[in-house]
Image: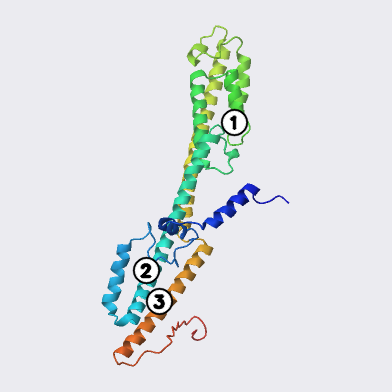
Amino acid sequence: MVPLVSEKQLVANRKNAHLGGVKTDAGKTVSSRNATKFGIFSKAIVLEEVEDEGEYRKMRARFFDELQPVGILEEGLVDRLAVLQWRMARIGRAEVAMIQKGRMEAAMKHDLEETQHVIFHADRPSIDYVEHFRVSLICKSLIFSVDNFVTGLEWFGLPLSDHFRKELKSRFGSTHDFPQIKHILDFDLVAQTKTKEMNKDAFWEERLKDPSLSDSDKKSLEDLTKIAREFAGHMLELARARLRFWEEMEWKRDEAEKDSKLVPPEKDLLALHRGESNLHRMWMQTLHELQRIQSMRLGKPPPLAAAIDVNVSGAGNGFDL
């Protein structure tokens, strides 16, 4: 069996063990917090760099002013009440922090999706390729591609250059988003038959002056290009409509996802509630004990040793106690 650590590391570990660990007070302070996972029941009353000791002292002073303890026993109970109150408030702050953290993570995830799309998927405009990224981003790339196509038809018309036709097929030929593409490519094939030695890199106005074009071929070319331009315009309108639709859908999804973070995950929520219930129970026990001792000191009948909390509900066929 392969050893978990090397012989050299084992010797070093044994040597460090004989040294006795951290020596300085500062090092011991840091080391004492190494195992801290949750601060609700931390031995430290005020957590450094997280809570304000001055605020705790003010709250503690109010407890002493209002409860007026006499003697070490009452003072200890009042001090315990202040500590428990401070820790219960800590749970409330923790729940708020969990909610804020969840909403921030949701927003950050969306930003990451956008960044990943720009880096990896900007050259894949079809929404057929959408799997893990925002559809609206794909639609924006789609609009960019269609807009370039519309501009190309405006400038050069039909027939398409070999490069333009190849690029058009690679970008839209494998998608079912735009059935107009097939018709435009069919019109282009017809236009190809109407031309012979035409310079396909020339602008549209220059093409129509080509001496090799007959009047009938010129008229056919104009008609075919006009229809192709109309189809391309419909493609652009469809792409923009899809963008508006997906932006609205994603905005609603984003808001719903953020709102879902208003409630922490069930596991975390149960842990918080258990901690809060435990602290509240200890707080009430301490308060009841303080009341008993103060009543005895003042010569009054002490409250019962046990406090009973009764919840009454009329949901059933009687009362649930």
First in sequence, mark 1 or 3: give its number: 1
- Neighbourhood count class around disc 3 (C-alpha, 10 Å): few under 14, some 14–19, many 20 upward: many
Mark seen at residue 109: none
75 to the left or right of 9 = left
Q: Give the spatial CA distance, label 1 vs label 3.
A: 69 Å
Q: Give the spatial CA distance, label 3 vs label 2.
A: 11 Å
- Name the residue that disc number 1 marks: 172
The amino acid type, in three-letter code, at marker 1 is: Phe
Mark seen at residue 86: 2
Note whether 281 is above or below 302 in the view shown. above
Which element is circle 3 on? helix
Q: Residue pushed farthest right?
A: 1
Percent position (x, y) of residue 13?
58, 53
Q: Nearer the viewer, residue 257 or 170?
A: 257
- Name the residue that disc number 3 marks: 283
Question: At 54% across and 29% down in the image, what residue appears?
Answer: 231
